[in-house]
Every structure is written in C-alpha cells, then in structure tokens.
Image (tube, grey):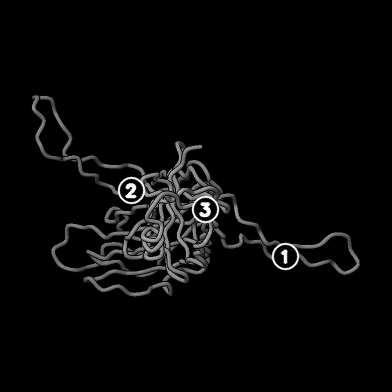
Amino acid sequence: MFFTLILENSTGDRIDMTTTANQYMTSKISGLHPPPGTVSTSSYAGMDGSYLNNAFIEKRNLVISFEMRGIGLEKRRHALFRVVKPSRYIKVFYKTSGIDVYTEGYVETCEIDNFTNKTNGQISILCPDPYWYSTTAIHACYSRVSGGFFFPFPQSDEPFTFGSYSTTDNIDIRNDGDETGFIIRIEAVTDVTVPEIAAMTPTIYNADTGEYLQIKGEILRGDIITISTKTGNKTVTLTRNGVDSNIINRLVAGSTWLTLREGLNTFHVQAVRNVKNLKITLMHTNSFLGV
C-alpha cells in the first residue's frame, strides 16, 4: 500500500519518512489501529454479573520503524535528530489514497543503530489525544441574512443575488468520522451604532437528542463567544474589544457538552431575545480512532 508519512516539529521543520530522495525508508508503523480501551467494573453483592464504573480510550503509542540507505547517513541522522527530539512536540501526517489525517503527540524515543551494516531506527511517539484528525476542516453557519454579493459583477443581464434571508433556525452539519466534540462560534452582528444588547441567552439544541448548550446573560454588539466541546479541551471564551476571558461560569445548569454523532447532525438555535442578531458557526474536523 502506498502511503506518505511526514513528521513536523513545533517550529514547522519537517522530515519526510517516505520520500526515496531523503532515503528514510519506513518499514513498519504500529499504532495506526484504535488504541485499547479500559473498562472498569465492580461486582454486585450476592448477585450475578457486575456494573460499569467507567470506560475510556487509552493514549495512542505510535511506533515508526525505518531504515536509512545510501551515502551521507551521518548528515541525515543529524537532520532527523533536529526534528525528532525526545520529550518534544511532534505532529504526524499520514496519507493514503483514501485518507489524509494527522495526529499530535510527544516523542518518547528516537533510536538509531550507528554501527550495523543496515542503519535501522525506531521512533516512539505518545499521543495523549488518541484521535487522528482530517487535514480539512468542515464549517456550517447559521445567520438570518447571508451575503450573496461578490466581485466581479456578472457579465450578463441576468438577475443576481445580493443576499438571502433564512426562515429556519436550524444548522445541518455532517460528520464522516467517529463521534467527537467540535467548536461553536457565536458572533453578535447587529446594525446598532452604539454598544447595546444584541441578544440574550443563546441556546443551541441538538434536534436529534434533545440535548442543549445554553449561555446565560447578555451578548453585546461585536462580542464573540467560542465554545470547545472537545474531550480534554472544554472551554467557553468571550472575546470583547480584543480581550479574551473565561466565561465557563455562564453555562446554564443542565447544559450538555454537545458532540457530533456519525452522519448528519441537526442543531436548532434559540435566544430569549434577538436571535436574528446572532451568527453561529459550527467547526469540526473528522476524527478517527483507527486509520
């Protein structure tokens, strides 16, 4: 199977482990499959079976075995060490004819045999986040008025759209990967000329499950609220006049950290007042436990 494997460090330096011109020949990659799950149970007193305490996915351990061929081995070994450093951040890009993904982790070891006929090496990477993510992001937007005026002007005399008005408060977004968290961006857009309340207490409902996420309080013109529902990175941030502040305390009791299930997801937008002044964008990348 033809594949491409590229390693990138925090400064953007890259090593292509599959290009024959670089002569790093990857012979084996382990850890592409889903990581193991940990299931904790407890026994009932005097009863058959047991009950579930919790279940979760372990971190990913990616191990790359490779050979170095040709001349100039020492120079290429040092080039590899400049990018792949133990305990340092590394981003792994993996691409085949059917998938183009990346994962992020930290280098555990980078070992190379210097004094053998064949110069073999092995890189071990620990990924706290077990998912592979698509390199292409997906966006779905809600706004009562959507712009349709673009340059250049049409060359014909046929009518063209300046904008369109939405009569639905629904947002549809498709997830072609595993169930995952995502980013919600709420912007207050209104024609008022002085700062005033643009909307009150926006709520986003999952139309399929009935779950919701609600932010209490006022949203002023120009405010941007960014919500991350990703596992291990659940945040609610308000950007006002260029200053970011944590407003996770404004989550209403009963709110759920919404996720995207596999397939088509439909969300419904509401607000106590002025929902028409809100622009909401859902952003996510398809995630995969195994590739």
Residue at image x 48%, y 50%? 287
Q: Please state which amino acid type lies under the numbered disc 1.
A: Ser
Give the residue at x 53% y 44%. Answer: 262
Q: Are marks 1 and 3 in contact (CB under 8 Å)?
A: no
| Pointer 2 residue | 141
Q: Is residue 181 visible?
A: yes
| Residue 55 falls left or right of residue 245 | right
Q: Which residue is mark 1?
A: 40
Query: Which residue is at 29% across, 56% downward?
Result: 278
Horizontal and vertical percent position of residue 25? 46, 48
| Residue type marked 3 | Lys
Determine if residue 256 is in view. Answer: no
Q: Amino acid at mark 2?
A: Cys
165 vs 27, left or right, is left
Q: Nearer the viewer, residue 102 or 190?
A: 102
Report the mark closest to the observer, 1 or 3: 3
Identify the element where label 1 is drawn: strand
Indicate the quadrant where residue 89 lies: bottom left
Left or right: 203 in relation to 221: right
* Circle nearer the N terminus (1, 3): 1
Query: Residue 176: where, in percent of width, then height?
Result: 48, 42
Label 3's element? loop
Determine which of the numbered discs, if any, sits on residue 118 in the image: 3
